[in-house]
Every structure is written in C-alpha cells, then in structure tokens.
Amino acid sequence: MPSAITGRQVLLLPPNLVGHLRLLLAHVAATASSAGHGSLALSCFSCSLALDAADGWLARRFNCSTSFGALYDVVIDNLTRAMLWSAAGGPWAGLPIALEGITLACTHAGGGAAWKSGGCFRDAPRWVQLVMGNGFRSPLGVLAIAGLSGCPLWLFARSCLRPGTWLTTPAWALVLVPGRLLAAAVECWVVQRRMQQLTQQDAAAHQRLKPS
C-alpha cells in the first residue's frame, strides 16, 4: 500500500470495494425480502456472507489492511446477520443482534483493528483461544463461524423456502445451533472481560483520587 493516501483512496482500496459490494447485496436482500422475493433475498444474503473471506484475502494479498477496513468488515457482518435474524422472526431474534453489537463495541475498544489478536484476548481461557486461534482457522473456530453466519441464514431459508429443500432440513441444526451457542459463549466472555477491565480501571482511578 502506498505510504501516503487520502481518506477517499482508503474507501477505494480493494478490500473496502468488496465491503461496498457486500453492503449493496445486503440492501438488495432486505428489499427483496420485504417484497416477498425470498429466494432472491436468500441468494443475495448468501453472496454477501460468502464474500466475507474475499476482503481479508485481498487485504493480505495487496498489503492494504486498514483500521477502517477492519471495522467496516465486522460492521457489515453484523448488519447482514441482523437483517437475517430480523427477517427470520421470533421474539428472541433481538438477542443475538444485541449480543453481537455489544461484542463489537467491546472488541474494538479493547483491541482496535487488531481485535482478533489484541488485548481483549490476552490471557483468555484455553477454550476461547481454541476458537479464536489463527484467525478462527481451527475446528472450534470453523464451528463457531459456521454457527454465527449459518444459523441465521438457515432460519431465514426455513422462513422463505418451501419445506423439504436441502437448505431447510432440520439436520443443519445439529451443526449450526451448537456453533452459534459456542460463538455466543465467546461473545459473553468478551463482554464480561471488558466489563471487568472497566471496573478495574475505575477502581484504580478512584484509589488515586483518594486523599492521602
């Protein structure tokens, strides 16, 4: 990546262009879903989620990783999944949406652009490291990511496709539901760890302000 670029040029870097496309696909999917075109919506949602791997590869391939891109990527992930959860319906749909949003705030406050390897996972329990290690490139990491994106996609497919298709089969629940629960466990640990850090910082600041 060039040593000096403008903010507009950052927006036009290859991985961020993929992000713009993903955002457009999510918008088309949401519009199609509200208009009753479930199959088109499912295709656009699927493409948006599948392209998640492309922006990271492009950033590494062309050495153009940016703080904006790291945040933009996760925001688009969360937004796409939030649309899926909302479209799938159910009184519980707001829970994963809220948990992912709170986790995003905690990870980027604790680790910034390098949140996967940043301070928020320092001294994490072994089971968390097994999920997060090597950028989710582990059996538990793959299971968590499959549940994170696959579970809302599967539920949405069940809400808009006719029963009996391979995408709507209940057998997917055997993998996707445990994967999403594993991801939720990691998210809860991240939130708890950030709250612990904040309370410890507040306690230390209060101690410094006490008169000697």
Image (tube, grey):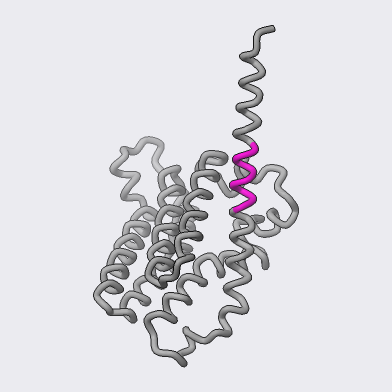
Q: Which residues are magenta?
A: 188-196
On whether residue 178 falls in the magenta region, the answer is: no
Foreground pick, 25 / 96? 96
Placement of 57 over or under 179, stated as above or below: above
Check the image and report above or below for 88 versus 160: above
In the rendered image, residue 195 lying in the magenta stretch gets the answer yes
- Residue 135 locus on image (x, y percent): 60, 56
Quick check: 93 above or below 98? Answer: below
Task: Answer with the quarter of the image where residue 173 lies.
Answer: bottom right
Which residue is located at x 54 percent, y 44 percent?
106
Residue sticking out furthest to the bottom? 164
- Counting the numbered discs, the total is 0
Could you tell me what secondary structure mostly forms the magenta stretch?
A: helix
Does residue 45 appear to the left or right of 207 in the view shown? left
Q: Quadrant of the C terminus?
A: top right
Towards the viewer: 145 or 55 = 145
Q: Position of residue 123 (x, y in %)?
A: 72, 43
In the image, residue 85 lies at what x, y percent? Answer: 43, 67
The residue shown at (41%, 72%) is: 88
Q: Is residue 104 above or below residue 168?
A: above
Asked where in the image residue 38 lies, by quadrant, the reply is bottom left
Q: Residue sitting at 60 percent across and 42 percent down?
A: 118
Q: Is residue 78 left or right of residue 135?
A: left
Outermost residue, front direction? Answer: 91
- Residue 22: x %, y % from top left: 36, 62
- Residue at 55% in and 84% down: 170
| Farthest top residue in view | 212
Q: Quadrant of residue 172?
A: bottom right
Looking at this rendering, what residue extends furthest in the left direction? 35
Q: Quadrant of the N terminus?
A: top left
